[in-house]
Image (cartoon, rainbow, N blue to C red):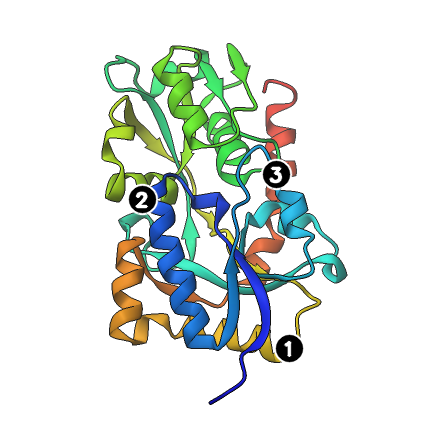
Amino acid sequence: MTTPLAPAIACSRMYNLSPRISEQWDRLFHWLSRRSDVDLEVIPHAAPAPLSELWARSDMGVVFMCGYPFSKLAAEERPVPLAAPVSLADWSKGQPVYASHIVVGRDASFDLADLPGLRWGWTVRDSQSGYNAPREFFAEIANEHSALETVGPLLNPHGVIEAIRTNAIDVGAIDAYAFQLLELHEPDMLAPLRVIATTRPAPFPLLVAARQLPLETIDALQAALLDAHRSPDGRAILKSLGLAGFAKPDMAAYGQLPARAKAIDDALSGRW
Protein backbone atom coordinates (compact mmCIF):
# COMPACT_ATOMS: atom_id res chain seq x y z
CA MET A 1 0.00 0.00 0.00
CA THR A 2 1.41 3.36 -0.99
CA THR A 3 1.56 6.33 1.36
CA PRO A 4 -0.62 9.24 0.16
CA LEU A 5 1.32 12.28 -0.98
CA ALA A 6 1.13 15.59 0.90
CA PRO A 7 -2.49 16.65 1.52
CA ALA A 8 -3.88 19.68 -0.27
CA ILE A 9 -7.18 21.47 -0.81
CA ALA A 10 -9.46 21.46 -3.83
CA CYS A 11 -12.00 24.13 -4.68
CA SER A 12 -13.91 25.13 -7.82
CA ARG A 13 -15.71 28.24 -6.56
CA MET A 14 -15.52 29.85 -9.99
CA TYR A 15 -17.87 27.20 -11.40
CA ASN A 16 -19.80 26.15 -8.29
CA LEU A 17 -23.01 27.49 -9.79
CA SER A 18 -25.51 25.35 -7.88
CA PRO A 19 -25.51 22.43 -5.45
CA ARG A 20 -26.15 20.05 -8.34
CA ILE A 21 -23.15 21.37 -10.27
CA SER A 22 -21.00 21.39 -7.13
CA GLU A 23 -21.71 17.67 -6.75
CA GLN A 24 -20.14 17.04 -10.16
CA TRP A 25 -17.01 18.97 -9.19
CA ASP A 26 -16.81 17.01 -5.94
CA ARG A 27 -16.97 13.78 -7.96
CA LEU A 28 -14.05 14.98 -10.06
CA PHE A 29 -11.96 16.01 -7.06
CA HIS A 30 -12.61 12.76 -5.20
CA TRP A 31 -11.69 10.80 -8.34
CA LEU A 32 -8.57 12.95 -8.74
CA SER A 33 -7.58 12.30 -5.14
CA ARG A 34 -7.77 8.54 -5.65
CA ARG A 35 -6.05 8.67 -9.02
CA SER A 36 -3.15 10.88 -7.88
CA ASP A 37 -2.83 9.40 -4.37
CA VAL A 38 -3.03 12.94 -2.98
CA ASP A 39 -5.31 13.46 0.01
CA LEU A 40 -7.50 16.29 -1.30
CA GLU A 41 -9.91 18.10 0.98
CA VAL A 42 -12.73 19.86 -0.84
CA ILE A 43 -13.44 23.18 0.87
CA PRO A 44 -16.15 25.81 0.34
CA HIS A 45 -15.07 29.33 -0.55
CA ALA A 46 -18.28 31.04 -1.49
CA ALA A 47 -18.78 34.65 -2.58
CA PRO A 48 -18.25 37.26 -1.29
CA ALA A 49 -15.10 35.70 0.23
CA PRO A 50 -12.19 37.17 -1.78
CA LEU A 51 -10.61 34.83 -4.29
CA SER A 52 -7.25 36.43 -3.51
CA GLU A 53 -7.38 34.77 -0.08
CA LEU A 54 -7.96 31.38 -1.67
CA TRP A 55 -5.15 31.83 -4.19
CA ALA A 56 -2.72 32.78 -1.41
CA ARG A 57 -3.17 29.54 0.54
CA SER A 58 -0.01 27.46 0.92
CA ASP A 59 -2.00 24.18 0.79
CA MET A 60 -3.85 24.98 -2.44
CA GLY A 61 -3.92 21.80 -4.49
CA VAL A 62 -6.43 22.08 -7.36
CA VAL A 63 -8.12 25.47 -7.60
CA PHE A 64 -9.50 27.44 -10.54
CA MET A 65 -7.86 30.78 -11.25
CA CYS A 66 -8.92 33.25 -13.93
CA GLY A 67 -6.17 33.76 -16.47
CA TYR A 68 -6.23 37.56 -16.18
CA PRO A 69 -5.25 37.88 -12.49
CA PHE A 70 -2.83 34.98 -13.00
CA SER A 71 -1.14 36.80 -15.87
CA LYS A 72 -0.74 40.00 -13.85
CA LEU A 73 1.33 38.31 -11.15
CA ALA A 74 5.12 38.31 -11.35
CA ALA A 75 6.44 34.90 -12.40
CA GLU A 76 7.86 34.20 -8.95
CA GLU A 77 4.49 34.99 -7.32
CA ARG A 78 2.28 32.84 -9.52
CA PRO A 79 0.86 29.54 -8.32
CA VAL A 80 1.87 26.48 -10.31
CA PRO A 81 -0.28 25.95 -13.43
CA LEU A 82 -1.54 22.36 -13.61
CA ALA A 83 -3.99 22.12 -16.50
CA ALA A 84 -6.64 23.98 -18.48
CA PRO A 85 -10.04 22.48 -19.33
CA VAL A 86 -11.12 21.69 -22.87
CA SER A 87 -14.87 22.11 -23.28
CA LEU A 88 -17.08 19.90 -25.43
CA ALA A 89 -18.93 23.01 -26.65
CA ASP A 90 -18.54 24.13 -30.27
CA TRP A 91 -17.05 27.49 -29.26
CA SER A 92 -13.95 25.75 -27.84
CA LYS A 93 -13.01 24.15 -31.17
CA GLY A 94 -11.23 21.46 -29.16
CA GLN A 95 -8.84 23.94 -27.55
CA PRO A 96 -8.34 25.03 -23.90
CA VAL A 97 -10.10 28.35 -24.51
CA TYR A 98 -13.38 29.90 -23.50
CA ALA A 99 -15.41 32.99 -24.31
CA SER A 100 -18.31 35.00 -22.94
CA HIS A 101 -21.88 35.01 -24.14
CA ILE A 102 -23.42 38.45 -24.47
CA VAL A 103 -26.92 38.02 -23.06
CA VAL A 104 -30.13 40.05 -22.99
CA GLY A 105 -33.64 39.34 -21.76
CA ARG A 106 -35.37 36.52 -23.63
CA ASP A 107 -38.26 38.74 -24.62
CA ALA A 108 -36.18 41.83 -25.37
CA SER A 109 -36.33 43.00 -28.98
CA PHE A 110 -32.71 44.21 -29.03
CA ASP A 111 -30.38 43.32 -31.85
CA LEU A 112 -26.63 43.92 -32.22
CA ALA A 113 -27.09 47.47 -33.47
CA ASP A 114 -28.92 48.40 -30.25
CA LEU A 115 -26.25 47.19 -27.83
CA PRO A 116 -24.01 50.30 -27.63
CA GLY A 117 -26.89 52.40 -26.31
CA LEU A 118 -27.98 50.00 -23.55
CA ARG A 119 -27.24 49.52 -19.83
CA TRP A 120 -24.39 47.04 -19.43
CA GLY A 121 -23.67 44.91 -16.37
CA TRP A 122 -20.28 43.58 -15.32
CA THR A 123 -19.12 41.14 -12.63
CA VAL A 124 -15.73 42.14 -11.14
CA ARG A 125 -12.94 44.25 -12.60
CA ASP A 126 -10.28 41.52 -12.50
CA SER A 127 -12.43 39.08 -14.48
CA GLN A 128 -11.63 38.23 -18.07
CA SER A 129 -15.06 36.79 -18.82
CA GLY A 130 -17.19 39.24 -16.84
CA TYR A 131 -15.34 42.51 -17.46
CA ASN A 132 -12.56 42.48 -20.06
CA ALA A 133 -14.43 40.33 -22.57
CA PRO A 134 -17.65 42.40 -22.69
CA ARG A 135 -15.64 45.65 -22.77
CA GLU A 136 -13.59 44.32 -25.69
CA PHE A 137 -16.79 43.32 -27.47
CA PHE A 138 -18.32 46.74 -26.74
CA ALA A 139 -15.24 48.52 -28.14
CA GLU A 140 -15.59 46.55 -31.37
CA ILE A 141 -19.25 47.48 -31.94
CA ALA A 142 -19.64 50.88 -30.24
CA ASN A 143 -18.39 53.06 -33.12
CA GLU A 144 -17.19 55.75 -30.66
CA HIS A 145 -20.42 55.63 -28.62
CA SER A 146 -20.33 55.48 -24.82
CA ALA A 147 -22.31 52.96 -22.86
CA LEU A 148 -25.58 54.43 -21.63
CA GLU A 149 -24.81 53.10 -18.15
CA THR A 150 -22.57 50.43 -16.62
CA VAL A 151 -23.68 48.53 -13.53
CA GLY A 152 -21.45 46.49 -11.26
CA PRO A 153 -19.96 44.68 -9.55
CA LEU A 154 -22.56 41.94 -10.06
CA LEU A 155 -19.97 39.38 -8.83
CA ASN A 156 -20.88 36.31 -10.89
CA PRO A 157 -23.25 34.84 -13.51
CA HIS A 158 -26.08 34.67 -10.98
CA GLY A 159 -25.74 38.41 -10.45
CA VAL A 160 -25.93 39.07 -14.19
CA ILE A 161 -28.96 36.80 -14.59
CA GLU A 162 -30.78 38.46 -11.70
CA ALA A 163 -29.96 41.97 -12.94
CA ILE A 164 -31.44 41.18 -16.35
CA ARG A 165 -34.46 39.46 -14.80
CA THR A 166 -35.22 42.50 -12.62
CA ASN A 167 -34.51 45.01 -15.42
CA ALA A 168 -31.55 46.52 -13.55
CA ILE A 169 -29.49 46.11 -16.75
CA ASP A 170 -30.27 45.45 -20.40
CA VAL A 171 -27.22 43.40 -21.37
CA GLY A 172 -24.39 41.53 -19.69
CA ALA A 173 -21.79 38.85 -20.23
CA ILE A 174 -21.73 35.31 -18.86
CA ASP A 175 -18.71 33.02 -19.02
CA ALA A 176 -19.61 30.63 -21.84
CA TYR A 177 -18.46 27.60 -19.85
CA ALA A 178 -20.57 28.66 -16.86
CA PHE A 179 -23.47 29.02 -19.31
CA GLN A 180 -22.74 25.51 -20.60
CA LEU A 181 -22.82 24.05 -17.08
CA LEU A 182 -26.14 25.75 -16.41
CA GLU A 183 -27.54 24.40 -19.69
CA LEU A 184 -26.52 20.89 -18.62
CA HIS A 185 -27.74 20.95 -15.03
CA GLU A 186 -29.87 24.06 -14.35
CA PRO A 187 -31.55 25.08 -17.61
CA ASP A 188 -34.37 26.87 -15.77
CA MET A 189 -31.85 29.42 -14.48
CA LEU A 190 -31.22 30.49 -18.06
CA ALA A 191 -34.90 30.93 -18.89
CA PRO A 192 -34.78 34.76 -18.60
CA LEU A 193 -31.91 35.03 -21.10
CA ARG A 194 -31.19 35.07 -24.80
CA VAL A 195 -27.65 34.87 -26.21
CA ILE A 196 -27.20 37.67 -28.72
CA ALA A 197 -23.47 37.26 -29.45
CA THR A 198 -20.30 35.50 -28.28
CA THR A 199 -17.00 37.25 -27.65
CA ARG A 200 -13.52 36.46 -28.91
CA PRO A 201 -11.92 33.45 -27.19
CA ALA A 202 -9.37 33.72 -24.40
CA PRO A 203 -7.32 31.09 -22.57
CA PHE A 204 -9.50 29.09 -20.19
CA PRO A 205 -9.25 29.70 -16.43
CA LEU A 206 -6.62 27.25 -15.28
CA LEU A 207 -6.31 24.85 -12.39
CA VAL A 208 -3.41 25.83 -10.16
CA ALA A 209 -1.53 24.57 -7.11
CA ALA A 210 0.45 26.37 -4.42
CA ARG A 211 4.16 26.78 -5.06
CA GLN A 212 4.79 25.48 -1.53
CA LEU A 213 3.50 21.97 -2.32
CA PRO A 214 6.09 19.21 -2.80
CA LEU A 215 7.03 18.70 -6.43
CA GLU A 216 5.90 15.07 -6.36
CA THR A 217 2.43 16.17 -5.24
CA ILE A 218 2.19 18.73 -8.03
CA ASP A 219 3.40 16.20 -10.62
CA ALA A 220 0.88 13.59 -9.45
CA LEU A 221 -2.05 16.01 -9.62
CA GLN A 222 -1.06 17.28 -13.05
CA ALA A 223 -0.58 13.78 -14.46
CA ALA A 224 -3.99 12.66 -13.18
CA LEU A 225 -5.70 15.69 -14.71
CA LEU A 226 -4.03 15.32 -18.09
CA ASP A 227 -4.86 11.59 -18.20
CA ALA A 228 -8.47 11.89 -16.96
CA HIS A 229 -9.98 11.40 -20.41
CA ARG A 230 -8.13 8.11 -20.87
CA SER A 231 -10.15 6.13 -18.31
CA PRO A 232 -13.86 5.25 -18.60
CA ASP A 233 -14.70 6.57 -15.13
CA GLY A 234 -12.72 9.76 -15.78
CA ARG A 235 -14.49 10.33 -19.11
CA ALA A 236 -17.89 9.87 -17.46
CA ILE A 237 -17.12 12.52 -14.85
CA LEU A 238 -15.71 14.88 -17.46
CA LYS A 239 -18.82 14.47 -19.60
CA SER A 240 -21.00 15.44 -16.64
CA LEU A 241 -18.99 18.69 -16.52
CA GLY A 242 -19.19 19.29 -20.27
CA LEU A 243 -15.48 18.65 -20.72
CA ALA A 244 -13.48 16.62 -23.21
CA GLY A 245 -10.46 16.64 -20.91
CA PHE A 246 -7.61 18.82 -19.69
CA ALA A 247 -4.59 20.20 -21.55
CA LYS A 248 -1.27 21.73 -20.56
CA PRO A 249 -1.76 25.50 -20.22
CA ASP A 250 -0.27 27.68 -22.97
CA MET A 251 1.66 30.19 -20.87
CA ALA A 252 2.28 32.45 -23.87
CA ALA A 253 -1.47 32.84 -24.38
CA TYR A 254 -2.02 33.88 -20.76
CA GLY A 255 0.89 36.30 -21.05
CA GLN A 256 -0.99 38.22 -23.75
CA LEU A 257 -3.96 39.04 -21.52
CA PRO A 258 -2.55 42.20 -19.81
CA ALA A 259 -1.67 43.74 -23.19
CA ARG A 260 -5.09 42.80 -24.48
CA ALA A 261 -6.71 44.51 -21.46
CA LYS A 262 -4.63 47.65 -22.02
CA ALA A 263 -5.67 47.74 -25.67
CA ILE A 264 -9.31 47.64 -24.50
CA ASP A 265 -8.70 50.55 -22.13
CA ASP A 266 -7.05 52.55 -24.90
CA ALA A 267 -9.83 51.79 -27.37
CA LEU A 268 -12.60 52.75 -24.97
CA SER A 269 -10.81 55.84 -23.61
CA GLY A 270 -13.22 56.32 -20.72
CA ARG A 271 -16.38 55.39 -22.64
CA TRP A 272 -16.82 52.43 -20.25
Tell me how far mark 3 sits from mark 2, CA to CA.
Answer: 34 Å
Q: Nearer the viewer, residue 51 or 147?
A: 51
Rendering coords of residue 226 (x, y %): 42, 72
Tell me how far mark 3 sits from mark 1, CA to CA.
Answer: 33 Å
**Residue depicted at x 60% and y 80%:** 216
User: Label 3 crowding class (10 Å Cα cut-off): few <14, some 14-19, many 20+?
Assistant: some
Amino acid beneath label 1: Leu
User: Label 1 crowding class (10 Å Cα cut-off): few <14, some 14-19, many 20+?
Assistant: few
Q: Nearer the viewer, residue 265 or 171?
A: 171
- Of tags 3 and 2, the one toward the viewer is 2
Q: Does the image show residue 178?
A: yes
Mark 3 and mark 1 lie on one chain; the one further toward the N terminus is 1
Rendering coords of residue 252 (x, y %): 59, 60
In this rendering, position of residue 70 left or right of residue 145:
right
Amino acid beneath label 3: Ala
Mark 2 and mark 1 lie on one chain; the one further toward the N terminus is 2
Q: Nearer the viewer, residue 151 or 25?
A: 25
Q: Secondary structure at mark 2?
A: helix
**Can you say which quadrant of the picture contains the C terminus?**
top right
User: Tags 3 and 1 in contact by the CB under 8 Å rule?
Assistant: no
Residue corresponding to mark 1? 215
In this rendering, position of residue 219 left or right of residue 269:
left
Residue corresponding to mark 2? 20
Q: Does the image show residue 62?
A: no
**Residue depicted at x 55% and y 21%:** 152
**Residue depicted at x 26% and y 42%:** 185
Q: Nearer the viewer, residue 44 or 214?
A: 44
Q: Residue furthest bottom?
A: 1
Residue corresponding to mark 3? 261
User: Label 2 crowding class (10 Å Cα cut-off): few <14, some 14-19, many 20+?
Assistant: few
- Of tags 2 and 1, the one toward the viewer is 2
> Does 220 sit above or below residue 197?
below
